[in-house]
Image (cartoon, coloured by chain):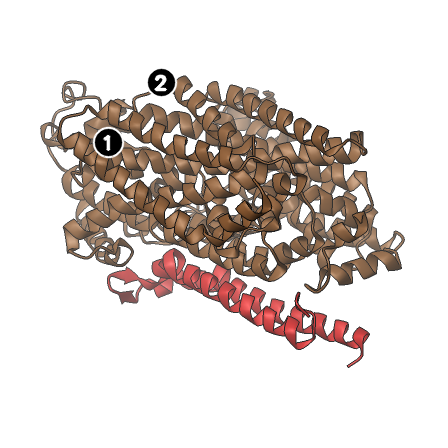
Chain colours: A brown, B red
């Protein structure tokens, strides 16, 4: 594409995406008409997938580029509003789209730790990090660490942390596409993983960051429409007001009345704080998620693409606004679903359950008396009234089931599938780019072959991108439950491994290279050891590291009686790696801190190591101090470009 | 103001603004939710206030403070001649 064509494109963004949104709505209406005339559901589902991925692919191909600046940072021409949208799509994963509302359904108030944690982190991004990295003018996060902290030791430390938080995350997104395909579209899991892989590659391979940016904007539009439509309709049906975020207050009141009638203890109510996480763990989780958000490389690198430092800042504000629209809707989903369950499922005779229970029981998302609720016959042996204790629903079912709960036609379910797919693909694209760019830019161009010609660098970048994508899809095709569970680790690892170095690199002139490298490793390893030991080697944790049992959030009774267990079953302490259902797994630790909040230990360790080692090593040079002054003010050229030129 | 003084004053003003931002952030991320059980006894449109703050209230503050910040920091940059177009 020539420069004029590009300028033409950016000045017409509003028009282009308005037409696109209109086109997408027209397409949904077209599918609704097809459904009316009797086209079968699975065909409609495939049309949704084919159409949306086709559009993303078209954007990906139109945005192809052979310029390094375009490939790594979209030419730094993305206006803040659109970068906000792209970052929101980059940020909101399959888990946010499909799982968040379900987590809130299951955890009630305490699930709001995720809502707070995954939004408030952007305040740290905007104030402490993003504008300064934009001024610095790097292509990747390890680039900054290497420059500020004198070379490859810091770069390698940064790459290790980046890889360990991004790879499990990208695998989880591809597993997400597999599950959406299997559950909503009737594809086989493997087929859906393959479709996901193709969907990711067409968006990223030819155009790098530039292509990913413009597809992510398109994906945000699809995912936000898909997320809002079912619950807006549900709210309108129930209250005549299409603002579920407002009307679910009434639903919460009704839930409390139902809870009382069903004999739910007041202390376990949906709205009662600190019933599942005690205050320490609630706030520790909020902190780890927020600080982790502010240090995840695939998020930070999106702010390298704005035309100016000023736009990087306003872009963070837009990002949070676009994320907010989804996150403040998720608790409404949870509340509406909970009321439906309390009103129409619990306390009903087994023969009179609503049909959606069976639709989602069939795919393993709902169990009654411990068996999948496949059909009336399957649970017919259990006669009588369905009690609260005998009904269990998986977190993933809530958003998926809402269209059917509201009695909506299949087209809405197809729309939700397209939205979930957009959420998974957009996040996978961003992560894949973060991983592949660290390999191609930081490892290859900066460490292995510094003088490679541009064309060779870009070929290497694409080859690595494809290889990483195939590796991730291959891991995902084995449905690794452990890896999906590890995504929560990414936040603590990033918070402890990268946050101290990024913040101190910008905010302290005294932090030395040795201090930073030591701090990154200390924070990262402290967190990693706590995560791995508490989850996989709890026996070792108790015997050698002196860990104790975590306690119940309300009764404060230890979850496991270690002394008694030791006397009766000493063998369970001697095992090596243990499975998730092991009696000690994720139930031991220090000071009752759950392993999901391991960053609580790693962050202070990282900061303290950095400060102490810096005190005893040679202070940064005058030149480096001037450089820090330079990134602290927007005026002037980007630092990195100045140095290169 | 001489150039080195301007650089210093600009950074001091930037730090002040950042501390205000972090203060607001900490208040609405942590402090206010410590009182969630008590706040829950107040109901607005059916929402228990403690629940509402964690589900919407704090989020609205975060969004608003970020838009305010991007304007306020820009003003600071211009005041000391440190903005991109100076």
Determine whether label 1 and label 2 are within 8 Å by CB.
no
Residue position marked by numbered label 1 in the rendering: A390
Q: Is residue A466 visible?
A: yes
Image coords of residue A593 (percent x, y): 55, 44
Give the number of callouts. Answer: 2
Image coords of residue B57 (percent x, y): 39, 62
**Is B67 rendered above or below residue B5?**
above
Image coords of residue A488 (percent x, y): 51, 38
Q: Residues within 10 Å of mark 2 (few under 14, many from 20)?
A: some
* Quarter of the view holding residue A241: bottom left
Provide the secondary structure element on which disc 2 rests: loop
In this picture, residue A61 sits left or right of residue A440: left
Q: CA distance from mark 1 to mark 2?
A: 30 Å
Q: Quadrant of the N terminus of chain A?
A: top right
* Quarter of the view holding residue B36: bottom left
Q: Is residue A402 visible?
A: no
**Is A394 rendered above or below residue A290?**
above
Nearest to N terminus: mark 1 or mark 2: 2
Residue position marked by numbered label 2 in the rendering: A188
Looking at this view, is A67 or A633 the one in front?
A67
């Amino acid at each position: 594409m020539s420069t004029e064509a590009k300028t033409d494109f950016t000045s017409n963004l509003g028009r282009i995406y308005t037409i696109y949104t209109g086109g997408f709505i027209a397409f949904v209406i077209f599918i609704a008409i097809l459904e009316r005339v009797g086209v079968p559901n699975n065909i409609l589902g495939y049309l949704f997938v084919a159409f949306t991925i086709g559009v993303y692919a078209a954007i990906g191909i139109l945005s192809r580029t052979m310029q390094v600046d375009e490939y790594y940072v979209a030419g730094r021409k993305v206006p803040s509003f659109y970068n906000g949208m792209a970052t929101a799509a980059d940020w909101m994963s399959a888990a946010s789209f499909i799982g968040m509302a379900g987590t809130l359904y299951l955890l009630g108030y305490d699930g709001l730790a995720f809502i707070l944690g995954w939004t408030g982190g952007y305040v740290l991004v905007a104030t402490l990090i993003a504008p300064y990295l934009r001024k610095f003018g790097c292509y990747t996060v390890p680039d900054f660490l290497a420059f500020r902290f004198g070379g490859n030791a810091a770069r390698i430390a940064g790459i290790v942390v980046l890889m360990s938080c991004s790879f499990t995350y990208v695998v989880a997104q591809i597993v997400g596409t597999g599950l959406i395909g299997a559950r909503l579209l009737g594809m086989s899991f493997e087929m859906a993983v393959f479709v996901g892989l193709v969907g990711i590659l067409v968006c990223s391979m030819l155009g790098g960051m530039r292509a990913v940016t413009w597809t992510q904007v398109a994906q945000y539009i699809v995912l936000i429409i898909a997320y809002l439509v079912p619950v807006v309709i549900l709210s309108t049906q129930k209250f005549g007001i299409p603002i579920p975020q407002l009307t679910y207050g009434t639903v919460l009141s009704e839930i409390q009345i139902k809870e009382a009638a069903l004999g739910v203890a007041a202390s376990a109510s949906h709205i009662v704080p600190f019933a599942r996480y005690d205050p320490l763990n609630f706030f520790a989780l909020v902190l780890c998620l927020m600080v982790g958000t502010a240090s995840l490389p695939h998020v930070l690198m999106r702010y390298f693409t704005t035309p100016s430092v000023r736009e990087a800042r306003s872009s963070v504000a837009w990002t949070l606004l676009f994320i907010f629209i989804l996150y403040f809707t998720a608790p409404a989903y949870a509340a509406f679903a909970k009321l439906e369950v309390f009103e129409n499922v619990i306390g009903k005779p087994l023969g009179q359950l609503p049909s959606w229970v069976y639709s989602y029981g069939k795919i393993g998302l709902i169990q009654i008396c411990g068996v999948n609720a496949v059909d009336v016959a399957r649970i017919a042996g259990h006669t009588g009234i369905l009690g609260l204790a005998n009904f269990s629903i998986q977190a993933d079912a809530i958003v998926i089931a809402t269209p059917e709960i509201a009695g909506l036609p299949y087209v809405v379910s197809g729309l939700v599938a397209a939205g979930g797919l957009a959420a998974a693909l957009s996040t996978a694209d961003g992560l894949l780019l973060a991983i592949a760019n660290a390999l191609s830019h930081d490892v290859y161009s900066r460490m292995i072959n510094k003088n490679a010609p541009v064309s060779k660098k870009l070929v290497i970048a694409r080859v690595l991108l494809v290889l990483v994508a195939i590796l991730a899809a291959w891991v995902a095709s084995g449905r690794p439950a452990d890896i999906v569970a590890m995504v929560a680790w990414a936040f603590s690892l990033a918070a402890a491994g990268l946050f101290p170095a990024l913040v101190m690199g910008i905010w302290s002139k005294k932090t030395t290279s040795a201090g930073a490298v030591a701090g990154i490793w200390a924070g990262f390893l402290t967190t990693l050891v706590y995560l791995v030991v508490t989850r996989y080697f709890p026996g070792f944790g108790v015997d050698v590291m002196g860990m104790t049992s975590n306690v119940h959030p309300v009764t404060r009774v230890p979850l496991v009686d270690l002394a008694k267990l030791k006397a009766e079953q000493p063998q369970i302490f001697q095992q090596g790696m243990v499975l998730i259902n092991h009696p000690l797994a994720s139930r031991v630790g220090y000071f009752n801190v759950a392993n999901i909040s391991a960053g609580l230990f790693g962050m202070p360790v990282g900061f303290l190591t950095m400060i102490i080692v810096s005190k005893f090593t040679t202070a940064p040079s005058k030149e480096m101090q001037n450089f820090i002054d330079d990134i602290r003010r927007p005026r002037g050229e980007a630092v990195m470009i100045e140095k290169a030129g | 103001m001489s150039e080195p003084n301007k650089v210093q004053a600009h950074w001091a003003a930037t730090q002040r603004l950042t501390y205000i931002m972090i203060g607001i952030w900490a208040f609405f991320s942590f402090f206010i939710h410590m009182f969630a059980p008590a706040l829950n006894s107040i109901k607005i449109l059916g929402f228990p206030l403690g629940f509402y703050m964690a589900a919407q209230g704090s989020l609205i503050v975060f969004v608003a403070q970020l838009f305010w910040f991007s304007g306020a920091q820009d003003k600071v940059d211009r005041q000391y001649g440190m903005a991109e177009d100076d």
